[in-house]
Amino acid sequence: MNSVILKSAERFIFPIQCLMALFFLLRGHNEPGGGFIGGLIMACAFTLKKMAIGYESNFWFRFFPPRRLIQIGWWLALLSGFFAIVKSQPFLTGIWGPSVFVSII
């Protein structure tokens, strides 16, 4: 898309969306839905950036292609599930804190 208005607006909206996503992520740490909503806002921010300046000229997409980010997400999900298996819990049970590393050793 070749819109001067969209390119100008993106310069101001993208950082605000990133800060909003971080706020919702940190706010939702102890409340339901924070990480999911923060991820959605961040995805909207990158979609806006992609629409405004294009895929080829985007700094973030050059170093973090979307397929690579999807692969990293899948591996992190699998890794977090195996911590629960080590503690004899069902797969993907949320285990937080240093107790995970103590039980492995």
Image (tube, helix red, strand yellow):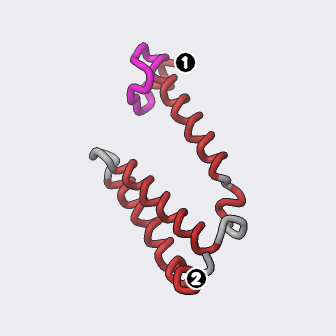
Quadrant assignment, res 94: top left
91 on left or right of 30: right
The residue at the point 51 percent across, 23 percent down is 82
Q: Secondary structure at mark 1?
A: loop
Q: Is residue 90 magenta?
A: yes
Query: Relative to residue 34, is residue 9 depicted above or below?
Result: below
Instruction: Residue type at mark 2: give it.
Output: Ser
Cα separation between marks 1 and 2: 57 Å
Sort mark 1 into few (<14), some (14-19) or many (20+) by Cα contacts within 10 Å. few
Q: From the image, tell me which residue sits under label 1.
A: 105
75 on left or right of 80: right
Instruction: Residue type at mark 1: give it.
Output: Ile
Q: Is residue 46 magenta?
A: no
Furthest residue in direction front, as rendered: 1
Furthest residue in direction top, as rendered: 88
Q: Report the quarter where the N terminus lies.
A: bottom right
Nearest to N terminus: mark 1 or mark 2: 2
Q: From the image, tell me which residue sits under label 2.
A: 3
> Looking at the magenta stretch, what is its main secondary structure?
loop
* Residue range (magenta): 84-99
In the image, residue 89 lies at what x, y percent?
Answer: 40, 17
Viewer-proximal residue among 35 and 41 = 41
Quadrant assignment, res 98: top left
In the image, residue 74 lies at what x, y percent?
Answer: 56, 36
Furthest residue in direction left, as rendered: 31
Q: Secondary structure at mark 2?
A: loop
Query: Relative to residue 26, is residue 5 depicted above or below?
Result: below
In the image, residue 96 lies at what x, y percent?
Answer: 40, 32
In the rendering, which numbered label is found on residue 24? Answer: none
